Image (cartoon, rainbow, N blue to C red):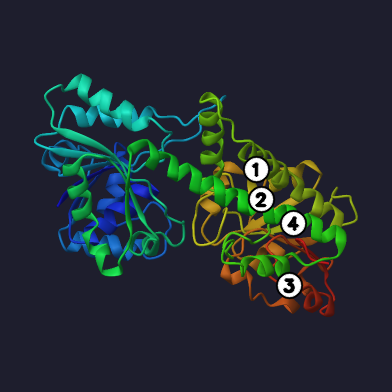
């Protein structure tokens, strides 16, 4: 099938490359000339394991191409996907739909024959209705259907998630659109992937509800971690004990400094605003948002406590800046709260991240960036593990101890064992463990 993907950000590029790998003919369209030029040179603007090879192989195979002008791709497409950004709008937390509406305007003037217009961007309930209105108003004669098809991609595992998903959600009651979507996802039949067809508004809400539930699960275990510290329990054993219950499950029960990234903060806030406007406030999610915001801000105080309460004149090494490993995404990362708070307390912050430092340099004024974990640790009064990259899981701890001014580690991801660290002579603190 012929697919036009509007937007070459995280979702658009991964989805476009995976559809091409399924055998479809995909054109990824973007208004940013530099992004298209880089993609045509084989340079991938985001870090995602396996994506560079996947893009290259499908470009070589003639199934994947990139364009600044999407007119031809949209005219000939069986399906046009809208995969543009929907950031939180300043001031009120609602999703900014200006890019979505602009894409709908462009699509309206170009589609020919029956075309399925698919919303891949995460959008509030009712956005599909608005896209349909925009297209219908401009092209009363157009033959099209607007479909919701939310993405459920985890950064760092996006290709696997696209090709072997738990489910595919498609929001449409149009029979012709359902057949197009079945054909697009037909390769997943080999894995017997469930394709759930729902109403369009239901599909839009499923995406928000899923992310809000996972954010709430993370926040729950973080609160349990605080309780564990006060009563002398171990949050990792608590998580295992409840996670073995199949009704609960073990995923997203890892205590830490709070959730971040491109989805959870934005989507929970948008759901709160949508629910409030609809007269059905979601109090659990409102509280989740507040607790998570407060938690990230409180992490610097843990570091100060580990150093006796005073950070003036001290140097703190941060290992990891991105919101999670295997991505260069800095959006709403805990480091954006932790590093400024440490500096406000008088500390010098030197940091290293395997993939995120280029982006972090634009967002963290005053941080000294180092070339590796040991460079970051050298001369510091304490080292803080903020993102659980694999290379931080097997540090030469004897070397770390020698490089530090004093043997203090604050492990905000529970990478190491408290007994082992104390046996090595570290003053060690972690999350939710005695």
Give neighbour class at mark 1: few <14, some 14-19, many 20+ (Cα, 10 Å).
Answer: many
Say which quarter of the image contains residue 63.
bottom left
Evaluate if marks 1 and 2 touch, with contact meaning CB atoms under 8 Å apart.
Answer: yes
Instruction: Tell me how many marks there are.
Output: 4
Left of 64 or right of it: where is 381?
A: right
Residue shown at the point (61%, 65%) measured from the top left: 372
Q: Residue 219: x, y in percent?
A: 66, 50
Q: CA distance from mark 1 to mark 4?
A: 13 Å
Q: Is residue 302 left or right of residue 18?
A: right
Rounded to the nearest whole Å, what is the CA distance between mark 1 and mark 2?
6 Å
**Residue 399 x, y percent position in the rendering:** 73, 76
Q: Is residue 185 left or right of residue 199?
A: left
Q: Mark 4 — residue?
A: 224
User: Which element carries disc 2, helix, strand or loop?
Assistant: helix
State the CA–CA distance, disc 1 to disc 3.
Answer: 36 Å
Please tell me which residue lies in front, 129 or 199: 199
The residue beneath circle 1 is 288
State yes or no: discs 2 and 4 in contact (Cβ < 8 Å). Answer: no
The numbered mark at residue 429 is none
Q: Quadrant of residue 157?
A: bottom left
Q: Nearer the viewer, mark 3 or mark 4?
A: 4
| Residue 400 numbered tag | 3
Q: Is residue 180 visible?
A: yes
Residue 132, percent from left and from top: 26, 28
Q: Which residue is mark 2?
A: 219
Circle 1 — which element?
helix
Q: Is residue 323 above or below residue 157?
A: above
Measure the C-alpha gap from mark 2 to mark 4: 9 Å
Pointers 3 and 4 in contact (C-beta within 8 Å): no
């Amino acid at each position: 099938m012929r697919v036009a993907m509007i937007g070459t950000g995280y979702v658009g590029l991964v989805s476009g490359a995976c559809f091409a790998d399924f055998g479809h003919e995909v054109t990824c369209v973007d208004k940013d000339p530099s992004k298209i030029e880089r993609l045509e040179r084989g340079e991938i603007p985001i870090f995602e394991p396996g994506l560079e090879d996947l893009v290259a192989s499908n470009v070589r195979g003639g199934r994947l191409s990139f364009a600044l002008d999407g007119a031809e791709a949209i005219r000939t497409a069986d399906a046009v996907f809208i995969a543009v950004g929907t950031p939180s709008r300043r001031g009120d937390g609602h999703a900014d739909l200006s890019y979505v509406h602009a894409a709908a305007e462009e699509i309206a003037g170009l589609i020919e024959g029956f075309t399925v217009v698919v919303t891949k961007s995460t959008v509030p309930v009712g956005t599909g209705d608005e896209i349909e209105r925009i297209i219908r108003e401009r092209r009363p004669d157009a033959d099209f259907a607007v479909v919701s098809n939310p993405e459920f991609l985890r950064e760092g595992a996006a290709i696997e998630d696209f090709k072997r998903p738990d489910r595919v959600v498609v929001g449409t009651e149009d029979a012709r659109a359902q057949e197009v979507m079945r054909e697009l996802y037909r390769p997943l039949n080999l894995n017997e992937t469930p394709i759930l067809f729902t109403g369009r508004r239901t599909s839009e809400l499923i995406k928000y509800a899923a992310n809000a539930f996972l954010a709430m699960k993370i926040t729950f275990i973080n609160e349990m971690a605080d309780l564990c510290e006060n009563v002398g329990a171990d949050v990792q054993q608590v998580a295992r004990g409840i996670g073995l219950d199949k009704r609960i499950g073990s995923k997203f029960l890892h205590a830490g400094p709070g959730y971040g990234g491109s989805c959870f903060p934005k989507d929970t806030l948008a759901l709160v605003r949508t629910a409030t406007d609809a007269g059905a406030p979601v109090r659990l999610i409102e509280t989740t948002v507040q607790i998570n915001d407060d938690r990230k801000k409180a992490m610097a105080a843990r570091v100060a406590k580990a150093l006796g309460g005073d950070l003036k004149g001290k140097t703190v090494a941060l290992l990891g800046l991105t919101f999670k490993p295997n991505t260069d995404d800095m959006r709403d990362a805990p480091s954006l709260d932790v590093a400024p708070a440490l500096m406000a307390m008088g500390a010098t912050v030197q940091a290293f991240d395997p993939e995120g430092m280029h982006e972090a340099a634009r967002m963290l004024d005053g941080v000294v960036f180092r070339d590796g974990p040991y460079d970051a640790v050298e001369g510091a009064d304490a080292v803080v593990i903020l993102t659980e990259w694999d290379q931080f899981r097997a540090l030469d701890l004897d070397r770390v101890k020698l490089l530090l001014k004093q043997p203090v580690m604050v492990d905000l991801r529970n990478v190491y064992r408290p007994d082992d660290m104390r046996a090595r002579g570290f003053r060690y603190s972690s999350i939710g463990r005695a």
